[in-house]
Amino acid sequence: MKQHKPNRHMDEREKLRKFRELDDAFAEALRELEKPNSRLDIPTGPPVRSLAAQEADDEQARQRLFEERLKTLMSEYAQPRDSVALLLRTMQSLGHIA
């Protein structure tokens, strides 16, 4: 015995109705864009930062983190600033740090 499924037919009608509503809304939006003096209230997000600005911020963050870690280590091992500066210059001259 074959049974009819009336819900399936209604679901297809509902999908078609929603598609038509979406299509109408899209067409209306396109017409608004084509108007020469239209001022649409288009929501925008925060300004986009350039890659160079992001890299500069990242570099500054890394520098601050390094300085904080260095100060912590200097305090932990009771090393004076001059001694650590000499060590860093020596390491840099040997090519161990950039």
Image: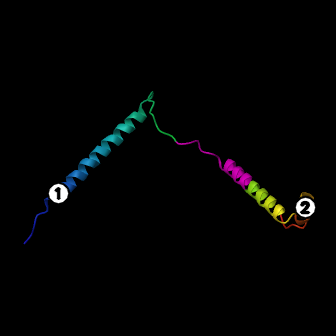
Q: Quick check: can you spot residue 98? A: no
Q: Main secondary structure of the magenta part?
A: helix
**What's the residue type where badge 2 is placed?**
Arg
Q: Left or right: where does residue 49 sit relative to residue 69?
A: left
Left or right: 23 as drawn, with respect to 65: left
Does residue 21 lie above or below 65 as drawn? Answer: above
Observer-nearest residue: 84 or 98?
A: 84
Secondary structure beneath disc 2? Answer: helix
- Residue interval drawn in magenta: 45-61
**Observer-nearest residue: 80 or 25?**
80
Is the residue under label 2 in contact with that under label 1 (CB below 8 Å)? no
Q: Spot the residue most to the left.
A: 1
Identify residue for label 2. Answer: 89
**Screen quadrant of the C terminus:** bottom right
Task: Provide residue 55's location: percent of width, then percent of height.
Answer: 69, 52
Which of the two discs, 1 and 2, labels the residue nearer the N terminus?
Answer: 1
Q: Circle 1 sits in a helix, a strand or a loop, which is it?
A: helix
| Left or right for 13, reference 19 | left
The CA distance from mark 1 to mark 2 is 80 Å
Residue at x 58%, y 41% (from the top left corner):
47
Q: Is residue 55 magenta?
A: yes
Disc number placed over residue 78 in the picture, else none: none
Say whether residue 72 is left or right of residue 8. right
Q: Is residue 8 visible?
A: yes
- To which quarter of the image does residue 26 belong? top left
Number of numbered discs: 2
Circle nearer the viewer, 1 or 2: 2
Q: Is 37 a magenta residue?
A: no
The residue to which callout 1 is attached is 9
